[in-house]
Image (tube, grey):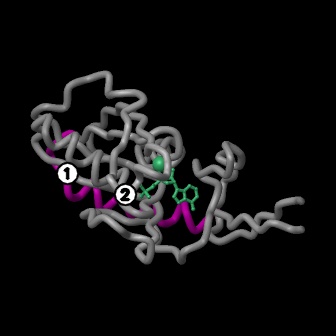
């Protein structure tokens, strides 16, 4: 069995969109600082590209979370693998994620962060699969809404591969 990657969103289109998002976000936080909380590992590529284009002062921290096995998935229980290094109390926190699928991970993460009393808390995602939503999550900035297909690249993986692709592609399995 081999895999083929079909390009869904080109590098050029992603960069154009990230610039637009960065302008909108910079405008929103004008006169303030923004503390980016990047969700490992997938959110890292997007976080860097976004951060480079923001015109307000930026600080960055990282968090890694993972869902428990399938049987407990419906409970929405998420495990913190790596917590933030710094406190976020009083900060303008912007969570930066690669993709929102069922919404379980982000719903847990946003509640967790909210309890730490940030000054403000918003959510930015490069990709969204709205059809797949199980848990409601308020998304403040979305790069692209995409159909229900499994995608890789720009941080997203298929069994830990393809994160480094500079575009978003769909994995096609050839028998
Ligand atoms: P959620 O909790 O179902 O929203 O899961 C979101 C997480 O599932 C993302 O952070 C990704 O790690 C992973 N994920 C969801 N859809 C895809 C995809 O199409 N490609 C790669 N990873 C995905
Ligand atoms: Mg992720």
Residue 163 numbered tag: none
Q: Residue furthest front?
A: 71
Judge whether 174 appears above or below 44 on screen.
Answer: below
Residue at left 32%, top 53%? 75
The answer to which of 62 and 174 lies nearer the viewer is: 174
Q: Quadrant of the C terminus?
A: bottom right
Residue 74 is marked as: 2
- Sequence order check, earlier mark of 1 and 2: 1
Question: Residue 85, percent across and down?
Answer: 32, 22
Chief SS of the magenta region = helix
Q: Is residue 122 above or below residue 60?
A: below
Q: Nearer the viewer, mark 1 or mark 2?
A: 2
Residue 151 percent coordinates (x, y): 62, 63
Counting labels gives 2
Q: CA distance from mark 1 to mark 2?
A: 35 Å
Classify residue 139 by image quadrant. bottom left
- Rendered residue at 13%/39% (across/down): 115
Disc 1 target residue? 29
Q: Quadrant of residue 128?
A: bottom left
Q: Residue 10 vs residue 125: left or right? A: right
Write down the region rendered in magenta: 11-33
Residue 89 appears left or right of 99: left
Going 37% across and 33% down the picture, which residue do you hit? 80
> In terms of secondary structure, where does tag 2 sit?
loop
Magenta stretch: includes residue 111: no
Of residues 16 and 114, the one nearer the viewer is 114
Percent of width and height locating residue 141: 32, 63
Work out which quarter of the rendered image holds the N terminus and state it. Answer: bottom right
């Amino acid at each position: 069995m081999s895999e083929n990657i079909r390009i869904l969103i080109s590098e050029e289109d992603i960069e154009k969109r990230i610039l637009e998002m960065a302008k909108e976000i910079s405008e929103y936080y004008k006169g303030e600082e923004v503390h980016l909380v990047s969700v490992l590992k997938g959110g890292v590529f997007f976080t860097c590209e976004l951060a480079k284009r923001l015109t307000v002062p930026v600080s960055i921290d990282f968090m890694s979370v993972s869902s428990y096995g399938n049987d407990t998935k419906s409970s929405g229980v998420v495990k913190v693998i790596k917590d933030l290094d710094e406190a976020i109390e009083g900060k303008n926190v912007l969570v930066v994620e690669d993709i929102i699928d069922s919404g379980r991970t982000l719903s847990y993460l946003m509640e967790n962060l909210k309890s730490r009393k940030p000054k403000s808390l918003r959510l930015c995602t490069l990709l969204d699969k709205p059809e797949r939503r199980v848990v409601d999550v308020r998304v403040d900035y979305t790069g692209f809404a995409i159909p229900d297909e499994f995608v890789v690249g720009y941080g997203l993986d298929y069994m830990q591969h393809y994160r480094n692709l500079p575009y978003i592609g769909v994995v096609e399995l050839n028998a």
